[in-house]
Image (cartoon, coloured by chain):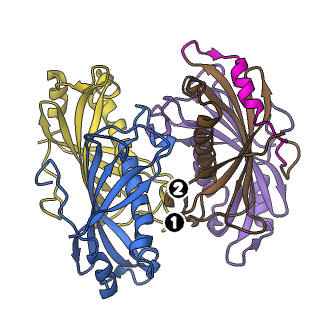
Chain colours: A brown, B purple, C yellow, D blue
Amino acid sequence: MADPYVVDVPLRWSDMDAYGHVNNVQYLRLLEDARVIGFREWFPDRPALLDEGIVVTRHVIEYRAPLTYRPEPVEVDMWVTRVHGAGFDLGYVVRDPASVGDATYAVAETGLALYDFAGARPRRLEPAAREALAAHVGEPVTFRRAGR
Amino acid sequence: MADPYVVDVPLRWSDMDAYGHVNNVQYLRLLEDARVIGFREWFPDRPALLDEGIVVTRHVIEYRAPLTYRPEPVEVDMWVTRVHGAGFDLGYVVRDPASVGDATYAVAETGLALYDFAGARPRRLEPAAREALAAHVGEPVTFRRAGR
Amino acid sequence: MADPYVVDVPLRWSDMDAYGHVNNVQYLRLLEDARVIGFREWFPDRPALLDEGIVVTRHVIEYRAPLTYRPEPVEVDMWVTRVHGAGFDLGYVVRDPASVGDATYAVAETGLALYDFAGARPRRLEPAAREALAAHVGEPVTFRRAGR
Amino acid sequence: MADPYVVDVPLRWSDMDAYGHVNNVQYLRLLEDARVIGFREWFPDRPALLDEGIVVTRHVIEYRAPLTYRPEPVEVDMWVTRVHGAGFDLGYVVRDPASVGDATYAVAETGLALYDFAGARPRRLEPAAREALAAHVGEPVTFRRAGR
């Protein structure tokens, strides 16, 4: 089982909302950035995997601690929690590399499906992509709330 | 059991991403708007419930159909799926009021916790708020994917 | 000279930043919405004018008063300040329809150029579009600061 | 006259709009980031200058070339174009450090005013801040379009 892949994701001052914390919706934006940055390394020869069709089918996210803007990026641990014929799931932990003690801001999972936009239909995950993903498979995400 | 509360939520052209569809993260933004608009009616005498401390603890969202910008708002059905001592959960269906047939763009659930920002600690849900919520209690959200 | 065209533009709670006011950058987002909504009426037979190629070449905006989120939309007065061979300029006033007295949040101007994305070159403004624009020509924008 | 101060500003994939380019409004968001990052260095002992009250009074921006998302940041040259009793103006050039030839995406100017939020009134620029700004004074911004 692989170590999680770590992506540095910069914050923006505008990620904060009127409460003065990074807005809960923006956490998902940070995860999008983590995927975009990370997939370039995971699939170096296959930009098509991303550009020609991958769609988000679901997100689950639990918020653990408030986050305020700082110039230093947050760290996102990202790994594969499931691979199936037409897509795969990712797990994430959003962490603070500079902090000691409990520095987990959120844990999350995203379902992704390959899609053929031109043909408007799902695509199969090709063997080369399955292989690339296999290097990043890890444990299921540990959510606090069971069930969904 | 109450009928779902329906909120008209306007889209913005900028909700679309480079794929030409409303971005998956922006769906959560639409749900935020639905809460802000809806809670003013649900808690007319209690703006403090919102302004002085309610935090999102989790989101689960499943995407069902792509959505493209149009000037007409989408409809968000919003109801209460659980009430507990320190918060409550909301269920949503994002729908197209103008469409016939399957017009569900997403189903989702949000966990909310009352929080005393000044005292930096959770707050109890007061009886008046429990009563207001009781009028909006409905079925659990029907997700396609069981468990997580 | 025509009366300004008036567009109702809804705010979002997330337009506010950590200072608790609608963020200065989001005002430009509101103007984008005003154009998208307004142009559908200005050019009912010519969606191509918008979809196939119009680019923003410049913005000038002066902020006059802070704006906080409310469920009611703001009003954007929008009119044409200049028409030339390859594009046109728009003037705007962002106002509060419900307010008495000085209720101007911002005044602004946007330069727009027609562009042929497929051919990667500027396009000429066609006679029908010039005619549609002529109905909306108004005064120059009155900025406080002369020159730039 | 000082060399421009250079800030690396990361892009986000979501900065692109449905046309597949970084949206014109998002350029202003990049400039906001440049200010937030840069001011921490310009005013190391005076975070209050920023946190307790500085408001944007105007923006002028001219777009020079389309920008598409890439993982490398853009470079923003930032300098002071004017200092007055209650605020100052900044000039910017948004550039591509990796490009040869014409790699200017935009030039812009922002008016900033010091503001006492608690007292709801303008503030005077203190001598220490004037001094910090003096180190960054440069030429006026060269816009293509004269006047505004």
The picture quadrant where one finds residue A66 is bottom right
- Secondary structure mainly formed by the magenta segment: loop
Q: Nearer the viewer, residue B2 or D66?
A: D66
Q: Amino acid at mark 2?
A: Trp
Compared to residue B13, the image places residue D45 above or below, namely: below
Compared to residue C22, the image places residue A148 above or below, namely: above
Whether labels 2 and 1 belong to a single chain: the reply is yes
**What residue sits 77% from the left and 30% below the top?**
A134
- In the image, taking residue C143 as reference, residue C97 lies left or right, namely right
Whole-percent x, y for residue A58 in the image: 71, 35
Which quarter of the figure is the N terminus of chain A placed in? top right
Disc on res. C18: 1
Considering the numbered disc 1 on the image, is that residue within a helix, a strand or a loop?
loop
Q: Which residues are magenta?
A: A118-142
| Residue corresponding to mark 2 | C13
Q: Tell me the crowding category of disc 2: few under 14, some 14 to 19, or many 20 or more residues within 10 angstroms, Cα based.
A: many
Q: Amino acid at mark 1?
A: Ala
Q: Earlier in the sequence, mark 2 or mark 1?
A: 2
- In the image, taking residue B32 as reference, residue D37 lies left or right, namely left
**What residue sits 67% from the left and 28% below the top?**
B64
The picture quadrant where one finds residue B98 is top right
Disc on res. B125: none
